[in-house]
Amino acid sequence: MRITSGTLGGRTLKAPPGETRPTQDKVRQAIFSGLGEFVVGARVLELFAGSGALGLEAWSRGAAEVVWVESDRRALAVLKENLRQLCPDAGAKAKCVGADVFKFLEFSGRGLLTPRAVPGAPAGQPAGQFDLVLADPPYDRTGDQCWLEKTLPALEAGPILRPGGFLVFELGSYGRPAIRSGWTLIWDRTYGGTRVLMYRRAEAEASSGQKSDASGQQTTESQS
């Protein structure tokens, strides 16, 4: 498993043991090709981080800050090792949090966890508000977990994902998109057993200063 492009392009990543399923290189490459220049200078949050591959790809491609959230202790240890090896000088701009994703989002939305303490938010943007959220939870083969249906409202509960920001969400190829007011599905592609959805959160108010490089057109595509 390797970083596909950017300053860390070609560097290898360690994968966690057990059932953790890292995002394939070709899928990550497609995701970040779709995001384009939106990643440069963005504040990024990776949920269900595992190895941290998605967030590290964002860091390699010019993200200003990345926060990784992972609850599994073994996966968290591998994630920390990947950060030590690939971005040892990043300091507070690249950090991981060992926590349940939804507890993290709940407390972050209430201003009780570390994202609100991160300095350097753009003028008029609350500290801790992210431009891009990446999520690759365990595949929900039985349909009991409803990861996407839980994640969308959780991201609305406080200053987590800014209006106009993007959510990239991975699920099994058999999974279905969720429809929710305030979110626009602009990208829906399948790569083998993985389906990738990209949502854009509605703008609270039109602003010419917001990032808007990712495509605003919905596309559906299937690749083997």
Image (cartoon, helix red, strand yellow):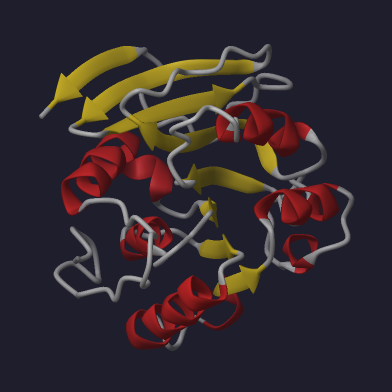
Q: Count of labels shown?
A: 0
Residue found farthest to the left:
224
Left or right of 51 on screen, residue 108? right
Q: Could you say where residue 33 lies in the image, as x and y percent from the top left?
A: 24, 40
Residue 23 lies, with reference to residue 154, above or below; the image says below
Residue found farthest to the front:
142
Residue nearer the viewer, 212 or 109: 109
Q: Could you say where residue 185 lies in the image, as x and y percent from the top left?
A: 47, 17
Residue nearer the viewer, 122 or 160: 160
Residue drawn at x 50%, y 25% as measured from the top left = 199
Residue drawn at x 29%, y 76% as measured from the top left = 14
Residue nearer the viewer, 163 or 146: 146
Residue drawn at x 49%, y 30% as measured from the top left = 142
In the rendered image, the quadrant that contains the N terminus is bottom left
Q: Is residue 163 visible?
A: no
Residue drawn at x 43%, y 28% as measured from the top left = 198
In the rendered image, the quadrant that contains the C terminus is top left
Left or right of 84 on screen, residue 223? left
Q: Is residue 64 visible?
A: yes
Q: Could you say where residue 221 lies in the image, as x and y percent from the top left?
A: 21, 17
Q: Could you say where residue 72 lies in the image, as x and y percent from the top left?
A: 56, 68
Residue 5: name its quadrant. bottom left
Residue 175: name its quadrant. top left
Residue 81 lies, with reference to residue 38, above or below; the image says below
